[in-house]
Amino acid sequence: MTIDEFSDYGVVQMDEDQIKGFLSSQNVGVLGLPTDGAPSMRPLSYWFDGESHLYFIYVLGSESRKAALSTRTDVARFLVYRADTMFNWQSVLLTGTISEVPESERQAVEDVMELRRRPDALEQASAVEETKLYRFEIDAQVGIEHIGLPPGFERESDEA
């Protein structure tokens, strides 16, 4: 089904301002990177700059498949979603390019970044392992949401 066909069920497309607001209010999504087989899917904490970029900190350790795949890909996807109830959810799918932030720019970005609710294990590993900062440049975006009951499920008002 297309997004337009889902409108009969209460699903609507988000506009650009709604997408930006949603991305700004969230902090975790799923990064999809192409591989020779099935796509590599990785949950990640992110920071949105309010315009057209997301930022991720990768903990590298001895090997990082995520970093290797990010370096060799031409296009990636990032999904951010929130599902409070089955009748109240939002989803934004981003398509874009991902690249390592040069060391000369890293400190300036990190000075304004806010990484909320980053898993403790990653915080601890970041303190002792090498990290790199990656930038996801948004080339295309689509957001959909369903807020409230779908048509036909609303309660009828009591008329006296």
Image (cartoon, rainbow, N blue to C red):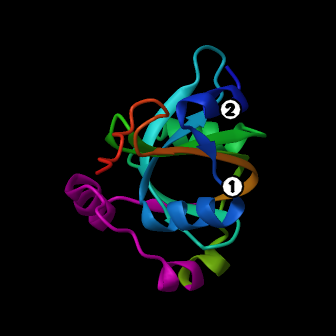
Of 9 and 85, which appears nearest the observer?
A: 9
- Residue 124 is covered by the magenta coloring: yes
Find disc 1 in the rendering and name its residue: 99
Q: Using residue 152 as the reference point, say whether residue 12 is left or right of it.
A: right
SS state under label 2: helix
Quadrant of the image for the N terminus? top right
- Residue 133 can be seen, yes or no: no
Q: Which mark is residue 14?
A: none
Of 62 and 112, which appears nearest the observer?
A: 112
Of 83 and 147, which appears nearest the observer?
A: 147
Cα separation, mark 2 vs mark 1, equals 31 Å
Q: Magenta segment range?
A: 108-134
Question: Is residue 100 depicted above or below 155 in this figure?
Answer: below
- Residue 126 can be seen, yes or no: yes
SS state under label 1: strand
Question: Is residue 17 depicted above or below 147 in this figure?
Answer: below
Which residue is outermost to the front? 160
Residue 130 percent location from the top left of the image: 41, 60
- Considering only order in the chain, which callout, 1 or 2, is on the residue closer to the N terminus? 2
Looking at numbered disc 1 in the image, what kind of residue is underneath it? Ser
How dense is the environment of label 1, judged by Cα within 10 Å: few (below 14), some, or many (20 and up)?
some
Find disc 2 in the rendering and name its residue: 3
Residue 133 percent location from the top left of the image: 54, 63
